[in-house]
Image (cartoon, coloured by chain):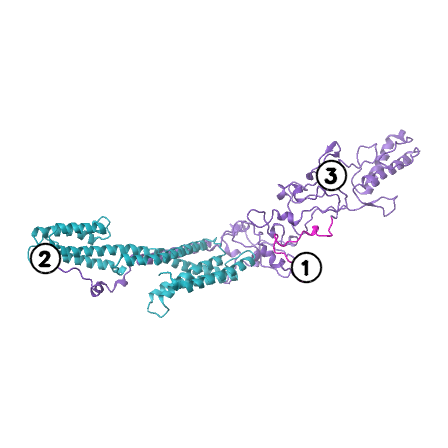
Amino acid sequence: MRIDRTHRPWAIATVVLAIASTVAYVIYALETPGGPRGGTGMGLTFGIAGYALVLYAGLLGARKRVPTWRLGRAQTWMRGHLWLGLLSLLLILYHAGFAFRGPLTLIMMLLFFIVIGSGILGAAIQHYVPSLMTSRVPLETIYEEIPHVRAQLRAEADQLAAGICGTLDGEAEEHSSVAVEIEHDDRIRFRDIYLQKVRPYLNDPESKSVELADPLRSGETFEALRRLLAPPVHGVLDDLESICEEEQQLSRQIRIYRWLHAWLLVHVPLSIALLVLGAVHAVVALRY
Amino acid sequence: MPGRIRTTKKLAQRIDLNYFKTLRGIPRWRRILSGVFVFTGLGWLGWHAIAGSPKPYNAGPLAHAHALLGQKCGACHVSEASFRESATDQACLGCHDGPIHHADQTFTPACSNCHVEHQGAFRLASTSDRACTQCHADLKTTHGESKFASNIRGFDSSHPEFAVLRSGYTDPGTVQFNHAVHLKDGLRGPNGPVQLKCGDCHQPPDSSNRALMAPINYERHCESCHPLQFDRRFSESAPHKEPQVVYDFVHARLVAYIAAHPAEIPLVDEPDKRLPSRPPQPPARNAAEWVAQRMADAQLLLWRKSCKECHSLSYPNGFDALPVVAKSQIAARWFQHAEFDHAAHQMVRCESCHVKARTSRETSDVLIPGVQTCRECHHAGRNAAEARCFECHTYHDWSKEKPVAGRYTVSQLR
């Protein structure tokens, strides 16, 4: 999500709430003998408010699971998640009085800092990287579909190659089942080239050692193949080059996707752990 | 041969409509890691719960005094559900008494209000100023007005001048003493000129109690220069005691002397320059008359000169009777409501705080340093001496402390 003008009301509301909380905290801290603590009335208020915001931020995940429910726009939820989640850190720090000496509270604060830090990193990535995806991956597909699409591309390439040299498993055929009439030697040469260069790449597009994985070297390779093979095959070579290029884009999409989403491997699990431990902390702290 | 044509339909046909039913890659790992983190956290808590250890929920290390109770939360915290984190007063008073501050205070805070635990190994008595100023910033008593300053918000800002330095207050001591004279260079001493230092006279009672200075003692601090000589025939001095004791001592010495030297009865003494000039006395006719004459001279020397040099003497029973010496009233403790420790300040030169000592000429001069002198070092900030209330003041009136019956056995605390 881009942090644009639509975030302004949320940002202003967050800043106003942060200032109000800070003023309240300063007065409370100065007026409380022994300093601010989580167990005082004001400390509990900060704690409850902070945990409520954490809970709200955590509900974004649940909201995404029920996209058809009329619970407000997903973008609104995301803006609230970003800004109120940020505010929750301040409130929890005020709740703790900037002191976290117990093992559980120390762990929770560490989790909190990591969650907020990864969230800020994620927000920055989500702000800048999607435009990169648009420009560098015009043939972007659904991430989860990539293995399925790749299988289709491989089948399509095999079909194109079979149109030149017949079946790929046995000897190159001479009969009329092929789509393009070329010399037998060219057919054998094409088959060998396909099986040695193109097919390995399509089988393992993420392999760095395959020369077709590199766009520059891929172009050079196909140019060399055009010089090597008869002109009737050039159309098929163009299609195979197009398939390889699409594979390269899918590889690029995977890399960018990882950039876009890897931070969630930290942010989401730790957020859930924080919510659970926070609930335990609340119950135990209120009991004692 | 036509090239590859990517129509929307063709692209749509690529999509496996069941793709969302199976998680792959990052979403899958996200779910796995979520489970791992949550179960790790709950496992850690559960393991401690099974072991009966409250360690994860410990709010922080305890003060040294309570370190023994580190794993026994229930010793201080009530076990019933409540919206409070602090230990109850009842729990605190079970182990130690907390005498009331003042009988006429309008508000008695809870123990945990001032003594904040789980802050680490430091003194629980190191309370915040707010613990004191919650009352002293606007002091009220059950009787209305307070005789103490009623608007104190901190030592730096609004602490009043010390009571003994406020106008109208003088040193209550009656022993006449001139600090300026005694501290001047080349003071005449018993064995030649001396330079007195503060520590020559102002000393702590003993090496284990160096907080306050002991009152000046005649035998230790004065006698060497100010002996109570009563007759030239005796090298020893009269005792520094009540007039009757002095009288009896001198009389006994004279009686014993003339008994041992009966030949001196008719002799007439040379006039003593220390005594006011008067006609020479006639020769004594017997020992009793000799003793009476010398007793008169000795009393004149003692009451009218030696004793009078420092003490105030009165003669309520007539000038022929023994004088009454005013009580010295040397203050042993100047701050009645605060603690001061000279030992903690021994790196500072005496006159650096007691600035008037070197020039003071009157007994009535109060030479205690003022609050501003203390503030030179004791003020807010990192590079300053402690300036919070507890540094000098004690809340509990420990003179009213009651013994507490112990409630633990050694094995319970182990």
Q: Quadrant of residue A64?
A: bottom left
The magenta stretch is B141-170
The label number, if any, that marks residue B192 in the structure image: none
Chain identifier for the cyan-coloured part of the image:
A
Q: Quadrant of residue B346?
A: top right
Q: Quadrant of the N terminus of chain B?
A: bottom left
From the viewer's perspective, tell me whether residue B243 is left or right of residue A81. right
Any magenta on residue B168?
Answer: yes
Colour seen for chain B: purple
Residue underneath mark 3: B182
Q: Is residue A256 above or below residue B219?
A: below
The label number, if any, that marks residue B146 in the structure image: 1
Furthest-top residue in this view = B263
Mark 3 and 1 residues: CB-CB less than 8 Å, in contact?
Answer: no
Q: Is residue A30 above or below residue B254?
A: below
Residue B50 visible at all: no
Which is nearer the N-term, disc 3 or disc 1?
1
**At which x and y percent is residue A234?**
13, 55
Disc 3 secondary structure class: helix
